[in-house]
């Protein structure tokens, strides 16, 4: 295993960071220890909690808490931040979000107010925030924004380091550990977080659906038990797929009238890499991002070659962009018509697919590379919604405390409503699919190479998928300088951002 050396510039930055944070860490630890006991009676609302739950017992005497947001429009599910009393009963989602906010307000004696800012353009929202920041405007205590756009705000020095805000209590189970790990630098600097407090981070996550009819037709058992026993692998999926690859009308031509093993968007190939635990960037033991090809070349190449040999050159795989001229609804119709055995899809699309296909499909994770892989993963999206604190926030401690309590109450309100009422919809009896959705929501890996589009990695994979020529090794060698320069820039942004 090769590891690239840290440049002297990085080293200086790291030493400085370390010196600053030793103090922060020690104060955080003692404060946490104090809180564990008082919060012990609060754990009942959170199932399967391993780490002690930490929330504030402060009151904020009627103060107003202001959130600017632009997220929550994906998949027609509505906003995930704020509803007025008048709008609180318009949907399952609005009721759940309203209830979460109400519980938080009651507990902390505050008023939560959300302000929706132009959702359509990143630059509009980010410029809006940066204009406020530069003008010293303290209107907003927190912002809820797409992960990708919040990262731009980090680069623009617009956000506070939330690792320095003890009251955030990022170890609590309602904060996404994948985001905490992938977007914290050395575990010391982090600028946004998500978890139960948001649902677009879940809805934008890809999952696998399978045709129940085709499994029945070919005498295959529905793969739920296999998944639970840890045996759902790429080889098994590919073996099943081969059964479905058929010239249905016998005209000797394979086209839209026929039946295939798998329907993917070309982006799903990136997700296969991540769910087989080979993301393009990994965080090393020191918490520093690395280009995975130089950090763990064997692993990355092994996983990519498996994807190439078993999927990319497999005639039973239909890539919507290349084989169906980007006709996404056509691909969806073919799956609805049981012409694909498997299909990669966003969790947020399950509801509309269910409306289209009744209960004719089941939900499973993306497969493991092989049975040795420890667990199933899903791939977190650049469109995941995340919370951040602008540098102009008047009271960061209060902001952290409130967002933490919002997360605490979101577990049983927002997250459960999205899973049970929306994603599972009428199909409540499909307990197995629901369990699979929970796995995907819990085990997201965020590949910073992908979500921050480092080093043109995804372009190379798309090209290979298009040409069906395996140039992976030479491609990775050619993008290495750019990928590593992008990582350097990221480290620099993280080093400078949030500095006093
Ligand atoms: Ca979530
Ligand atoms: Ca045919």
Image (tube, grey):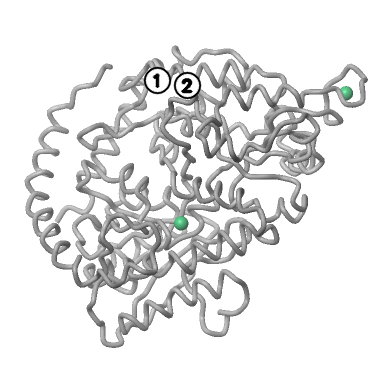
Q: Nearer the viewer, residue 417 or 288?
A: 417
Res 393 visible: no
The residue lying furthest to the bottom in this view is 62
Picture quarter with the C terminus: bottom left
- Residue 267, by quadrant, is top right
- Quadrant assignment, res 478: top left
In this rendering, is residue 440 above or below 258? below
x 53%, y 46%: residue: 205
Task: Name the side, left or right, on which 366 lies relative to 154.
Answer: right
Out of 259 and 20, give the one closest to the viewer.
259
Tell me if the residue at label 2 has its CB under 8 Å from ligand 1.
Answer: no
> Marks 2 and 1, Cα distance to the nearest angstrom?
6 Å
Left or right: residue 5 versus residue 133 is left
Judged from the image, the secondary structure of the residue bearing numbered disc 2 is: helix
Residue 325, image x and y in percent? 73, 32
The image's mark for residue 303 is 2
Q: Position of residue 422 (x, y in %)?
A: 62, 61
17 up-or-down from 80: above or below:
above
What residue do we see at 65% from left, 59% from top?
428
Whether tag 2 and tag 1 are in contact, CB under 8 A, the answer is yes
User: How many neighbours does mark 2 have within 10 angstroms: few (below 14), some (14-19), or many (20 or more)?
Assistant: some
Point out which mark residue 299 bears.
1
Give the left or right position of residue 221, taking residue 123 as reference.
right
Give the image location of residue 103, x and y in percent: 40, 78
């Amino acid at each position: 295993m090769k590891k690239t050396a840290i440049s002297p510039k990085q080293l200086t930055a790291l030493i400085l960071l370390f010196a600053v944070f030793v103090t922060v860490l020690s104060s955080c630890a003692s404060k946490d220890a104090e809180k564990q006991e008082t919060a012990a009676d609060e754990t009942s609302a959170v199932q399967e909690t391993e780490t002690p739950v930490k929330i504030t017992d402060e009151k904020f005497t009627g103060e107003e808490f202001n959130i600017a947001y632009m997220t929550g429009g994906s998949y027609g599910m509505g906003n995930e931040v704020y509803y007025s009393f008048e709008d609180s009963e318009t949907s399952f989602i609005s009721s759940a979000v309203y209830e979460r906010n109400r519980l938080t307000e009651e507990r902390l004696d505050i008023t939560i107010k959300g302000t929706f800012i132009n959702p359509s353009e990143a630059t509009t929202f980010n410029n809006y925030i940066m204009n406020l920041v530069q003008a010293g405007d303290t209107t907003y205590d927190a912002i809820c924004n797409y992960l990708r756009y919040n990262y731009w705000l980090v680069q623009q020095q617009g956000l506070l380091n939330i690792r320095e805000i003890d009251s955030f209590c990022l170890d609590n189970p309602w904060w996404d550990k994948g985001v905490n790990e992938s977007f914290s630098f050395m575990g010391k600097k982090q600028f946004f977080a998500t978890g139960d407090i948001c649902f677009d981070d879940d809805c934008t996550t890809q999952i696998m659906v399978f045709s129940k009819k085709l499994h029945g037709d070919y005498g295959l058992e529905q793969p739920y038990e296999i998944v639970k026993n840890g045996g759902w692998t790429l080889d098994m999926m590919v073996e099943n797929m081969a059964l479905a690859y058929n010239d249905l009308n016998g005209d000797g031509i394979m086209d839209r009238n026929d039946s295939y093993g798998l329907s993917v968007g070309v982006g799903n190939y990136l997700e296969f890499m991540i769910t087989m635990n080979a993301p393009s960037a990994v965080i090393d033991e020191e918490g520093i991002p690395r280009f995975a090809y130089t950090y763990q070349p064997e692993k990355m190449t092994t996983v990519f070659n498996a994807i190439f040999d078993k999927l990319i050159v497999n005639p039973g795989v239909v890539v919507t962009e290349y084989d169906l001229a980007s006709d996404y609804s056509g691909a969806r119709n073919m799956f609805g018509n049981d012409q694909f055995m498997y299909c990669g899809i966003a969790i947020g699309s399950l509801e509309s697919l269910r409306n289209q296909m009744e209960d004719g499909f089941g939900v499973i994770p993306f497969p493991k590379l092989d049975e040795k892989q420890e667990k199933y993963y899903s791939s977190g999206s650049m469109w995941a919604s995340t919370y951040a604190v602008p540098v102009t926030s008047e009271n960061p401690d209060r902001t952290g405390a409130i967002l933490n309590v919002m997360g605490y109450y979101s577990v049983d309100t927002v997250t459960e409503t999205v899973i049970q009422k929306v994603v599972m919809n009428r199909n409540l009896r499909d307990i197995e699919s629901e369990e699979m959705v929970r796995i995907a929501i819990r085990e997201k890996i965020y590949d910073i190479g992908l979500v921050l589009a480092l080093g043109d990695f995804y372009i190379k994979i798309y090209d290979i998928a298009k040409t069906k020529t395996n140039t992976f090794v030479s491609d990775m060698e050619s993008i290495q300088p750019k990928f590593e320069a992008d990582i350097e820039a990221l480290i620099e942004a993280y080093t400078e951002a949030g500095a006093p």
